[in-house]
Amino acid sequence: MKINMRRTLISLAIAGTAVMALSGQAYAAGKITIMVGGITKMVYLPAKLTEQLGYFKEEGLDVELQSQPAGVDAENELLAGAVQAVVGFYDHSIDLQTKGKEITAIVVFGQVPGEVELVSTKVAANFKSMADSKGKTLGVTGLGSSTNFLTQYLASRHGITSKEYSLLPVGADNTFIAAMKQGRIDAGMTTEPTASQLLKTGDAQVLVDMRTVEGTVKALGGLYPASSLYVQRSWLNKNKDDAAKLARAFVKTLKFIKTHSAEEIAAKMPKDYYGKNKELYVQALQNSLPMFTADGKMPPGGPETVLSVLSGFNPNVKGKHIDLSKTFTNEFVDQIK
């Protein structure tokens, strides 16, 4: 009798635990976690700004923003199912399709990369273009990241293969600045506000500027849609209502960016984003504003440019059939009036 009673109590305890676990899952299911590939980078400004402006809550969304130092790390979190969405570069959706993974961008933030290839002032006299990258150490945020993709492509345009230089993952922000100042990299690709910080101190000079449409077309041959919100297609097919709400929230932010000054936008950001040098942050933001789309839509011809760039050096993509229609959709941003 005691044994049966004990079994009953154990069964009830297990059942109770299961109920608690299920209720926890149900609660978690109402939350959307977005991983950002470096939340303080200005290319990904719409992520934090949307939160600051309260647009997620306006749409009835419970969103948590997390950050990884590189887009490739954020991508891995998405593929593992640890997060529901990523704010990262669109080019990952093409690269991943070749590996059997279906990732779809649903809002495009940047019509250009917003990246700058900086060369250390110490070696600038003998490093005038990417044609001089042979034998050099080039900094990227992470191996397999979009900065990695773009660096390889820019070198390949001058006939230099990835075996002729070294790539060093140095992250972004302070870790990138330290790598440049310490001479661990000869040149490297980064975004604002890091670029403006190194230019102001005189530790670096601009080698390739992809913060503007003009500079991007010159470097890459066309518009290069970059920062975006992307999700796994399997999640998208089951959560179209949440996808539509996310799209509305981010497009509101993009419209805010287009209708407000750099000073007004900076005033909405947390103080730790600009620290003690708000003036430099505002200037860097002013330099970055042209990169953002006004409506979240994929720019015409953009996917083709990205595919052309990746095909130029990436053996995973070169010669492969890529269905670009599966790498992005304007379905949700088109619904916004």
Image: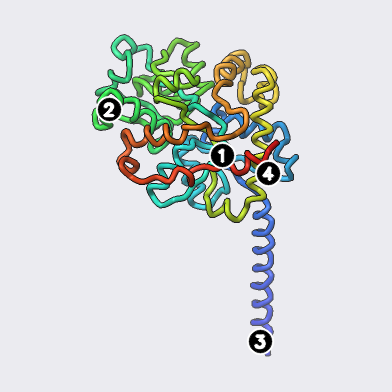
Q: Nearer the viewer, residue 130 or 141?
A: 130
Q: Residues within 10 Å of mark 1 (few under 14, many from 20)?
A: many
Question: Would residue 73 be visible to someone looking at this image?
Answer: yes
Tell me the residue at 69%/70% (across/down).
Answer: 16
The picture places residue 225, in percent across and down from the top left corner, at 49, 32
Marking on residue 88: none
What distance separates the C-alpha of mark 3 from that of mark 4?
52 Å
- Mark 1 or mark 2: which is in front? 1
Q: Secondary structure at mark 1?
A: strand
Nearest the viewer among 111 and 32 is 111
Q: Secondary structure at mark 3?
A: helix
- The 10 Å Cα crowd at callout 4, few under 14, some 14 to 19, many 20 or more, is some
Mark sitting earlier along the chain (4/2): 2
Residue 245 is labelled as: 4
Is disc 2 in contact with disc 3, using a CB cutoff of under 8 Å? no
Marked residue nearer the N-terminal end (3 or 1): 3
Residue 177 can be seen, yes or no: no
Q: Which residue is mark 2?
A: 165
Mark 3 = which residue? 4
Q: How is the image coloured?
A: rainbow
Point out the frontmost of discs 2 and 3: 2
In the drawing, what numbered circle is on residue 229? 1
Three-letter residue code for mark 2: Tyr
**Is label 4 in a helix, a strand or a loop?**
helix
